[in-house]
Amino acid sequence: MPTIDTDLNRKDVQKIAILGAESSGKSALAEALALRYKTLWVPEYLREFVETHARVPRAEEQFLIATTQYQRELQLMPKANAWLFCDTAPLMTEIYSDYYFDEADAGLLALAAEHKTQYGFTLVTAPDFPWVADGLQRESPAVRQRIHDQLLEVLEERDIPHLLLEGSLTQRLAQVEFAFSFLMQ
């Protein structure tokens, strides 16, 4: 089982989780925010996993995917400037595990439960971008909507503060900039 070295956390860098269902613009937003704020972003490990293995992950691989994602966040923390934009988080892996496998394992549940303490803020991308199939990783617009609804439900149940971003990439960047003006006060 992978271990997580939390000593790499820096108090002067806020990790920002960017969550959303498939094909909702998370990666484009993470990259654009990193450019805008002259910092780094953590690409989604799941995409790399699917490309490398030429298949979707199995239930028993979900914890590995979440811990690898989280470890990569921690590795980039020392190099980030003020913000580290994270294209997904273990919480999304938990939601997808529940959807596809009817449960998430205990390690994944524990990691996802720490979302409020591990991320300074959570951005949620609305499924208002055109849905684009990309082979193995994306299923359908209907699944995208169900995952989005489940995500919002989980965030509310767990009392996780978040900002729902809608519209074009430019509009989403403006919404984040407005929200960050309050976070930085």
Image: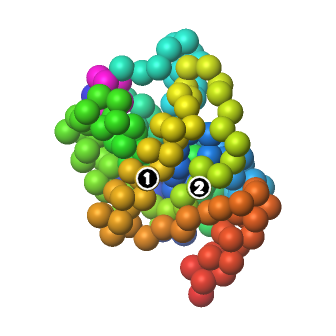
User: Which quadrant of the view contains residue 100?
Assistant: top left
Mark 1 to mark 2: distance in Å?
10 Å
**Left or right relative to 159: residue 51:** right
The amino acid on which the numbered mark 2 sits, given as a three-letter code, is: Ala
The image quarter containing residue 4 is top left
Main SS of residues in magenta: helix
Could you tell me if residue 14 is visible in this image? Answer: no
> Residue at 34% across / 57% down in the picture?
154
Quarter of the N terminus within the rendering: top left
Instruction: Decide: is 67 above or below 32.
Output: above
Q: Does 62 appear in magenta? A: yes
- The quadrant the C terminus occupies is bottom right
Q: Which residue is mark 1?
A: 149
**Side of 170 where 3 appears, left or right:** left
Magenta residues, start to end: 59-63
Q: Is residue 44 left or right of residue 113?
A: right
- Residue farthest along the left direction in this orientation: 106
Marks 1/2 in contact by CB < 8 Å: the verdict is no
Q: Which residue is mark 2?
A: 126
Q: In the rendered image, is residue 65 in sight? A: yes
Residue 51 is a magenta residue? no
Residue at point 35%, 24% (across, down):
61
